Image (spheres, rainbow, N blue to C red):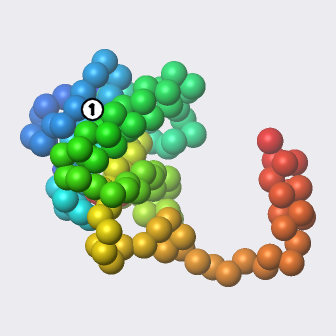
Amino acid sequence: MTEDCLFCKIVSGEIPSYRVYEDEAVYAFLDINPASEGHTLVAPKKHFNSFTDLGAEDIAALFEAAKKVTLALEKAFSANGMNIGVNNGEVAGQEVPHVHVHVIPRKKGDGGRGIKSIVWTEPDTANLEGMAEKIRKAF
Ligand code: AMP
Ligand code: ZN
């Protein structure tokens, strides 16, 4: 528990939430300002600021839970699809610095778009091999 973290307070019950699922490692609850009906946030019970702070077991538990939530949302809202994603870092739209996965049910004709509608900076595609090499060297 990290003091003054909104989602730590939600996990501990200090701040109320609409819980939809929980297990030993993960707590899932409705987003208070949902992008679509059923929009759920899946968060590790332990506090981590960033996705890259998670260990392998934390990631496994988080995404196992996100999968269960996805299946439940499909059933509950007859969703045709789901956007499953993490805003990682302030510049990427992360408002609450406690890692969480958004699971957003989608319906045919809902007017929403896919993950590339988040950002489109038109990078140069003439040298994709150079781009790939730059990344490979960074591992
Ligand atoms: P992010 O921008 O990825 O950090 O997402 C934070 C999300 O938390 C936003 O979609 C908010 O609508 C949601 N949120 C903020 N406060 C609460 C709260 N008290 N209970 C549930 N969801 C919240
Ligand atoms: Zn926290």
Taking the spot 88% from the left edge, 72% from the top edge, the residue there is 127
Q: Nearer the viewer, residue 94 or 122?
A: 122
Quarter of the image for the C terminus: give it. Answer: top right
Give left or right: position of 104 versus 136: left
The image quadrant that residue 122 belongs to is bottom right
Q: Taking the image as drawn, is residue 58 in sight?
A: yes
**Residue bearing the label numbered 1:** 27
Task: Residue 103: give x, y in percent of width and height.
Answer: 34, 50
Residue 119: x %, y % from top left? 54, 73
Q: Is residue 47 above or below residue 119?
A: above
Residue drawn at (84%, 48%), measured in percent from left and top? 136
| Residue type for callout 1 | Tyr
Q: Quadrant of residue 56?
A: top right
Quadrant location of the N terminus?
A: top left
Q: Is residue 68 left or right of residue 125?
A: left
From the Cβ of disc 1, is ligand 2 less than 8 Å away?
no
Q: Is residue 56 above or below residue 127?
A: above
Q: Position of residue 126 (x, y in %)?
A: 86, 78
Would residue 6 be visible to someone looking at this image? no
Residue plotted at (35% across, 23% down): 25
Asked if residue 56 lies left or right of residue 31, the reply is right
3 or 84, nearer to the observer: 84
Residue at 38% in and 44% down = 100
Callout 1: helix, strand or loop? strand
Query: Residue farthest to the left?
Result: 16
Q: How many marks?
A: 1
- Percent x, y for residue 39? 25, 54
133 vs 46: above or below: below
Using a 10 Å C-alpha cutoff, classify the residue at mark 1 as few (fewer than 14 neighbours), some (14 to 19) or many (20 or more).
many
- Against 13, residue 104 (above or below) is below
